[in-house]
Amino acid sequence: MLAPLEELEIRLGYTFKDRSLLLHALTHTSLVAESPPTGSTGLAAVTDNEQFEFLGDAILGFLASEFVFSLSPASPEGDLSRLKAHLVSAARLHEAALELELGNYLRLGKGEELTGGRKKKALLADAVEAVIAAIFLDGGPQHGLDACRSFLTRYLWNSIPLQNLARPHIPIDAKSALQELAQAQGMPVPRYVIVHETGPEHAKRFTVEARIGKLHAEQAEGSSKKGASQRAAELLLKRFQASEARAPKSNPEDSLEQSQSR
C-alpha cells in the first residue's frame, strides 16, 4: 500500500525530491496554532503554508497569463484578462482540489477538522496554490516552472475551448471589472490590503480594503482573504457605477445651441 504522500504525488503527476516541501504545502495554519512552541518538545516547529500560497498565487498568475496569450495573442487585453481571471478563480482552484481529493491529505488542527475544514472551498483553493509553490521550489526555477505548467494544464485549463475567448462567454469577477474600469478611466491599479483579522484559526474573518488612489476605497469582511477582496471590489465598483448614474448627462440640443452661439 502506498503512503498518503506517494498517492498524492501520483495524482499530481509529480514526484518530489524533497517531500517536506509537499508536507509544508499541506499544513494549514490551524495546526500551527495548536502545536507546541519551538523548543518546548525538542522537535522542529510546525510551519503553515501561507507563504507557499503567496508564491503559488504569483506562479499561477504568470502561467495563466502565458496560457491565455498563447491561445489568442491578438485578442484585446480586456478579453484576455477576463479569461485569466476565470482560470485562476477560487472556483476553478476548488474544482482542481476536488479532482485531486486534496482535502484527504491536508494537515489540520482539531478545531478546523471539527468544522469541516477538509471541504471548505477557500481552504482547498489556497492549498492548491501552496502545492503549486511546493512543486516550483522542489524542481528549481526552470524544471519547477515546467512541472507547474504541466500540472496546471492537466487540472485547471485543459478543457478551456478557444471559442471561450469570445467576450459574451468570458465570465468576469468584481476585481477584474474594477481593474478594467480603472484602466479605462486612467486611474491607478486597484490595491487590496488586509486591515483586520478576527476569530480563532479555524474560523477566521478577514476585513480587506479595496483602494484606487487616495480618494476611492471600500472595505468588506469575509471568511477568506479572496472572498473579502472580491466583496470589497464589488462595493467599490458599485460606488463608481452609482456615481456615474448620478452624473448629469449632456443634452445634444444644448451642445448644438452652445456651438451656434459661438
Image (cartoon, rainbow, N blue to C red):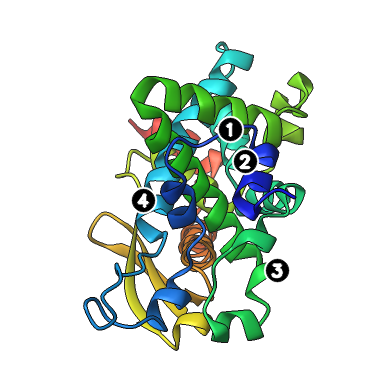
What residue does disc 2 label? 9
Q: Any mark on residue 190, and which?
A: 4
Residue placed most toward the observer, 25 or 3 = 3
Label 2 Cα neighbours within 10 Å, binned few <14 / some 14-19 / many ≥20: some
Q: Earlier in the sequence, mark 1 or mark 3?
A: 1
Amino acid bearing label 3: Lys
Q: CA distance from mark 1 to mark 4?
A: 36 Å
Q: Earlier in the sequence, mark 3 or mark 2?
A: 2
Q: Any mark on residue 218, and which?
A: none
Dot 2 falls on a residue whose secondary structure is helix
Q: Any mark on residue 119, and which?
A: 3
Query: CB under 8 Å between callouts 1 and 2?
Result: yes
Amino acid bearing label 1: Tyr
What residue does disc 1 label? 14
Q: CA distance from mark 1 to mark 3?
A: 24 Å
Dot 3 falls on a residue whose secondary structure is helix
Q: Earlier in the sequence, mark 2 or mark 4?
A: 2
Residue in the image at 22% along x and 60% along y: 214
Residue 175 shows in the view: yes
Q: Give the label, 1 or 3, closer to the camera.
A: 1
Q: CA distance from mark 3 to mark 2?
A: 20 Å
| Displayed quadrant of residue 151 | top right
Query: CB under 8 Å between callouts 1 and 4?
Result: no
